[in-house]
Image (cartoon, coloured by chain):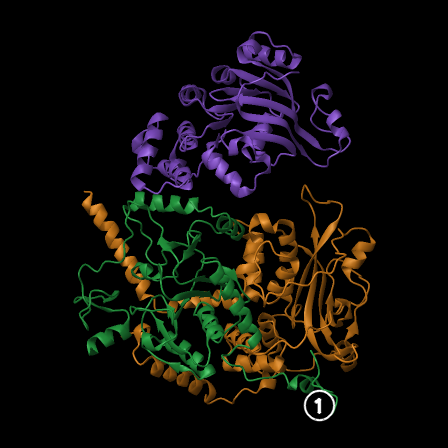
Amino acid sequence: MGYAAARGGLNAILTAENLVRRLRDFDPSDRIELDQFTGRLRLLVDRVMGESGLWAPELAAMALRQGEGDIIEAVHLLRAYKSTLGRLDTAIPVHANDMQLVRRVVPAFREPGGPQILGRSTDYTARMLRTTDHDIIDNGASTSAIEGVLKTRPSNSRMSDVLRDMDLLVDRRRTDDPEPFDITRTPAKPPAPRSALLSSMARAETGALVNQWYRNILGPDGYLHEVTLGEVRHGKLPINVRHPMTGGSVNIGSFRATEVEAIEDLNGSEEDRTRFDVGYGFCFGHNERKAIAMANLDIACYRDGAKSGLEQSLLMTTDGLDSAGFLEHLKLPHYVTFRSMVERKVAVRRVADGSK
Amino acid sequence: MTLDTASHTSPTTIAQLVGHRTTETFALLDEESKREIRRALLQAVCIPGYQVPFGSREMPVARGWGSGGLQVTLACVGVDDAVKVIDQGDDEGVNAVNLRRLVTMSTGIDETTEVDEATLIQSRHRIPEDDMNENHILILQVPVPEPLRGIERDIRELARMHAEADYSRMWVSLYEDKVRNGVITQSTGYPCLVASRYIVATTPIPRWDIPRLHQSKFLTLFGAGREKRVYAIPPYTDVEPLTFEDVPFEVESADGATCRLCGSSESFLVETPGKQESWSCSDTAWCRRRRNA
Amino acid sequence: MTSIIVPSPIIQVRNLGKYYGNFDPAMIERTGPEHGTARDHVTASIVAAWGVNFDVAAGEALGIVGESGSGKSTVLRCIAGDVAASTGDVRLTPFADGSVNILDLDPSARRQLRINTLSVVYQDPAEGLALGVTAGGNIADPLTASGWRNFGAIRDRARELLARTEVPLDRMDDIVRNFSGGMRQRVQIARALANKPPILLLDEPTTGLDASVASGVLDLIRQLLEELQVAAIVVSHDFGVIEMLTERCLVMQHGRVVEDALTDQLLEDPHHPYSQKLVAAART
C-alpha cells in the first residue's frame, strides 16, 4: 500500500522525520553555523527575510539550515514562527530619505545630485566560475577606497523630487493619511488600496514577481513596456517606536532594505502625456531584481491593473507559500475525489451507450 | 500597551517591557488571532453559506494542506474537547495524523477515532458515516471555496454574482453539462444552495455525503486557509444540491459492490483497482466498528 | 414640438438626457441641431441625448431614426440600463405599475427588470448572447434566471422559440459561435422572447447582417411584433426598417428629437429639414 493510504500513519511520519533529521544534521560534512549563512550567503538570507515579511537574520539562517536550503521551506518556517508571536507595537513611520545608503544607482541621469555608489555589486563583474580558491588576490582596490565605500551615507535627493521640481512628474501624493492596509490581518482582493498591493509585492516570491514582469513585457498576452529606473538604493533604515511613558521616539534597531523608483513614460489617451509617473518598489534586504520588478508592476497596476486583471494576479497569485503549498497539495491522497470522477465517467458512458 | 505598575524598576529594554505579556500559547495561535478567527466564524454562522474573509495565519502545515481547517479547529478548541481528524475518511492517513498531533500537542486534549467520543471532527474530503448531533462540530478543509470558479475567474465579478444572487450562469452550465453528457458530471464538491441564498462549494466531499448536510443536527464549518475565507452551514439549515427538478441528484453508485472487510453497501466505498477489483469503506473507523460488532 | 399623446402608455419617457464629461447648464444651449454638433466647444463635453420625451403604448412599435451620433442608441441604452442616464424619468407600467423611475434602480432590481419585463436585441448578437454556450443554453439562461427548474420544460420552451425564429432544431445543441450572423440574430431574438416580456428594445437589429439575410430577419421581427403585441422601441438609421416595423417614429439629430410623427406621414411629408434630408436620401 502506498504513501497515500499508509497504515500506522504516525510511524510513517516519524520515520520520515527521523530520516530528514538524521541525514541533514549528521551529514559527514561540518555543521553549518548561522554566521556562515549571514556572513557568506547574505543574499540568500535577505531573500528569505523578504519573502517571509520578517526581519530576523539569525532566524532566517536557522530556517535555511533546517530547510536544507529550500527557500520556500525556510519562508514557511519563519512565517509560521511569526504566527506564534503576538504583535507588540507598530513602528513609527520612517521616511525613505532616512536611508543610510551603501549603494545607489540612477540610470535616468548621468550626474544625478547626491552620490551614485556602485557599492557592493557584481553587476559589472565577469561571471566566471571560480573553481579553485587560489585566485583570491587583492585586485588592487585600495583599502581606503573600500573603507570609504563601506561607510553608509545619507541620501539627500531622489529622482522623483528632481522630476517634480522640473514639473515633469504627475503629482499623486495624498493629502490625507489613511492607515496602511494590513495584509496579515485582512486578505487583500481587488479593488484594493495601493498599500495592499505594495505590501503584497514586498513579500511576494521573487521569481513570481520577475515572471509577472517578464511575461507582461514579452508574453503573448503582455502589454507592458519597460520603465526607466530613477533610483535603485540599498541601505539601512532605523526602527523607531514610541516610548510608552515619555511618548518620545526610541530607536530600537535597524534593518536593511532595497528601494526602487521606476519612471514611467505616460502615453495613454487619458493620461498626461507631458509628464512622467513613478512606480515604487521596496523589500527587506538586498534584492534588487525583486524591487525593480515590483516598481514596474506597481505603476503598471495603477495604469491598467483593473482592466487587465494584473491587480488580481499580483494580489492573489504571487505569494510563495500559497502557490507552492497549493501546487504540492496535489501529492495528498485524492482517492475519494478520483473515485467520484471515475463514477461520473461510467455514468456518461452508460448514457451514451444507452442511447445507441 | 500599559506598564506593569507593580514592577519596582522602570524597564530599560524591550525584553523587560514585554516580559509580562508573553504567555504560553494554547493551541498554537495567540489569543488575539483565535478571537479574530472566531469572530469570522460567528459571521459565517449568521450568514449561512457566505464566504467570510479572515486574516489567515501561516500554520505549521503548508497552504493547501489543511491550514484553514486547522485554524478553525484551533480557534474552537477548549480543554474539554476531544478531536477526531480524518483524511479521505481515514484516521490513519498521514496528513490527518500530522494535523491531529499538532492539535493535541498544543492543547493537551484527547484524541479519538470514534465519532461518539469526539466533539470536534476535522476532515478532508469526507463526512464520517456515523450520525453526528448537536454535540459535534464538523470542520471541513477547503482547497477552493469558490463554487463559481469554473465559470468565472474575475474576483470582482464573483463577488457581484454572490452579492446579487445572480447565479444564472451556474444554471446555464448545469444545463450545458446535462445536454452535452446526458448527466450532470460534477463529481465532488457539488454546488449546493444553502438556506436558499448562497451557492457554496461543498469542498471535495463526495455526492454521497451531501444529503447529510441538509437539516443536519451538527454545525459544519469550512476553513480555506490559503484563500483566507471561512463559511458555515448551521444546524437545521436547508442544503439543496443544484439540479433540475426532473434530473435527480445522483450519488456515487458502486453497482452493488460491498466492502470486502465488513460487507457494507451503505457506506461510501473506494476501490482498489486491478485484476481482482475490491472495494472497502473509506470511513475506516466506521468499518472497523462494524467488523468488531 | 408636441408629442403625440398616447392613451395608457406602457413606456413613459420624460426628459431623458445623457452627457459625457463635465456638466455646465449652459452647454445644453450650446449644443444640438441649431449648432450642428453634440459637442460643447467650451467644456468639451458631449450632450449625447437631451430632453427626450415619448410614450409607447401596448402593441405599438416606436421607431427612433437618425444618423450615427444622433443619440438614438444612447436613448435605447439608457432605457435598457446599459448606460447610466444623466437625467430623466422612465416608467414602465408592467414594472411596479409604473410607480418607479427605472433609471434609479439598483443593479439587482435592474437585472430583475431585464429578466422579466424588458428585453433587448442588440445589433451585434455577440452582445446579447454567450458565444460559447449552445443555442438552447442561451435560452435556458433567462428561463432559469426567472425560476424555471424543469429541464424538460426548458428544452420544450427552447425548441418552441427556436422553431418560431426559424432556427433548425438540430442545431439547438450547437454552440452559438458556430452559427452564421443571421442565425445568431435569430437565436438572440428567441432568447429575448423567452420570458414573454411585455417590452422589447431593438437596436439596429439587422444592420450587421448581409442584405439577403437581413430581410428574412426583418420579416420575422415584423411578424413577432404583430403576434406578441409587445411595446417595442426600434432604433435604426435605415428608413426601410423603420417603415416595416413601426407605426410612429422620432427623428433625432445631434442628441435632440427634431420630429415626432406617424411613420407613414413622416415618409410622405417630413417637416423638419433634417427629416427631409434623411427621407430624401432613403428614397434614392
Say which residue appears at 72% left-offset and 52% top-offset.
A277
Chain C in the picture: what colour?
A: purple
Residue C273, given in percent of the width and then of the height, sits at 66, 12
Chain B in the picture: what colour?
A: green
Residue C168, given in percent of the width and then of the height, sits at 32, 29
Q: Quadrant of residue A215?
A: bottom right
Compared to residue A230, the image places residue B129 above or below, namely below
Give the farthest residue toward the bottom.
Answer: B8
Q: Which one is nearer the viewer's eye here, A282 or C174?
A: C174
Chain A in the picture: what colour?
A: orange
Give the farthest residue toward the top.
Answer: C268
* Residue C30 visible in the picture: no
Q: Quadrant of residue C88?
A: top right
Kindly identify which chain the residue marked by label 1 belongs to: B
Say which residue appears at 48% left-offset and 22% top-offset.
C58
- The residue identified by callout 1 is B7
Compared to residue A114, the image places residue A34 above or below, namely below
Quarter of the N terminus of chain B within the rendering = bottom right
Asked if residue C32 lies left or right of residue A15, the reply is right
